[in-house]
Image (tube, rainbow, N blue to C red):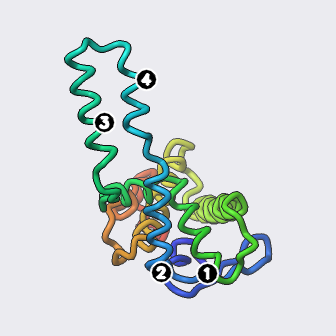
Amino acid sequence: MNLNEIVAAESSFTVNGKTYQTSPLTAREHAKVQTRILSMRGDPIEVARKLADVLNPEERKELFEKAYNDAVRAKIVTAGEVDAFMNTLEGTVYCIYLSLQKYHPEIDEDEAASLVEQQGREFLDGIITELQAKVGDATPEQIARLVADKEAAWLSELICKIAGLPEGNSASPAQGETELTGHSLGNDGSKS
């Protein structure tokens, strides 16, 4: 099973012969994502203290006023912050970790990261095998570009599913075609 299907619905995937059951992210898990983002923010007053020594008195006053306003404003996470977090490896791993908790509460974030890494390796190994069978005369640079495009598409679709967006909603390099030695290789790996 492709890893990008894991967090969209009840699903399963296999790594090293072991099957893992996942569940879609609930509102509670989405709230945990927002809490994680809030925890990553620095304390604005503490940041201002560290910068204060290099500023003149007027700049220092303005900095502390802004820091105070940031510190007392509502603790809201914007959609942009959620998108940015989910576009990181840390965000992807965290969401997969959350999707595993219903059926595998014993799995911690480090183990979830290992599963993502192993699943990614298996995914890339499949692409390399496919390439070797279909495009024997490609240069290493062309193969690397195709692998990067396919990996970007895979991560993009995974992020869309985690975020609950419809498939194909995110742009990725692999949505077009990648040129290889005068042939186009489509998203399904077929040569034209």
Q: Kindly indicate the quadrant of the structure image that contains residue 123.
A: bottom right
Instruction: From the image, state whether disc 2 or disc 4 is nearer to you.
Output: 4
- 90 or 53, which is in the foreground? 53
Quadrant the N terminus occupies:
bottom right
Residue type pointed to by label 1: Thr
The disc, 1 or 4, on the residue closer to the chain's N-terminal end is 1
State yes or no: discs 2 and 4 in contact (Cβ < 8 Å): no
Which residue is identified by label 2?
26
Could you tell whether 59 is left or right of 105 in the image?
left
Q: Considering the numbered disc 1 on the image, is that residue within a helix, a strand or a loop? A: strand
Q: How many numbered marks appear?
A: 4
Residue type pointed to by label 4: Lys
- Neighbours of disc 2 within 10 Å: few (<14), some (14-19), many (20+): few
- 43 or 187, which is in the foreground? 43
Cα gap from disc 2 to disc 3, whole angstroms: 33 Å
Cα gap from disc 2 to disc 4, whole angstroms: 39 Å
Cα gap from disc 1 to disc 2, whole angstroms: 12 Å
- Neighbours of disc 3 within 10 Å: few (<14), some (14-19), many (20+): some
- Neighbours of disc 1 within 10 Å: few (<14), some (14-19), many (20+): many
The disc, 3 or 4, on the residue closer to the chain's N-terminal end is 4
Q: Considering the numbered disc 3 on the image, is that residue within a helix, a strand or a loop? A: helix
Cα gap from disc 1 to disc 3, whole angstroms: 41 Å
**Residue 190 at what x, y percent from top left?**
47, 70
Instruction: From the image, state whether disc 2 or disc 3 is nearer to you.
Output: 3
- Relative to 74, does residue 167 appear above or below in the rendering? below
Could you tell whether 21 is left or right of 167 in the image?
right
Which residue is identified by label 3?
67
Which residue is identified by label 4?
50
Which residue is identified by label 1?
22
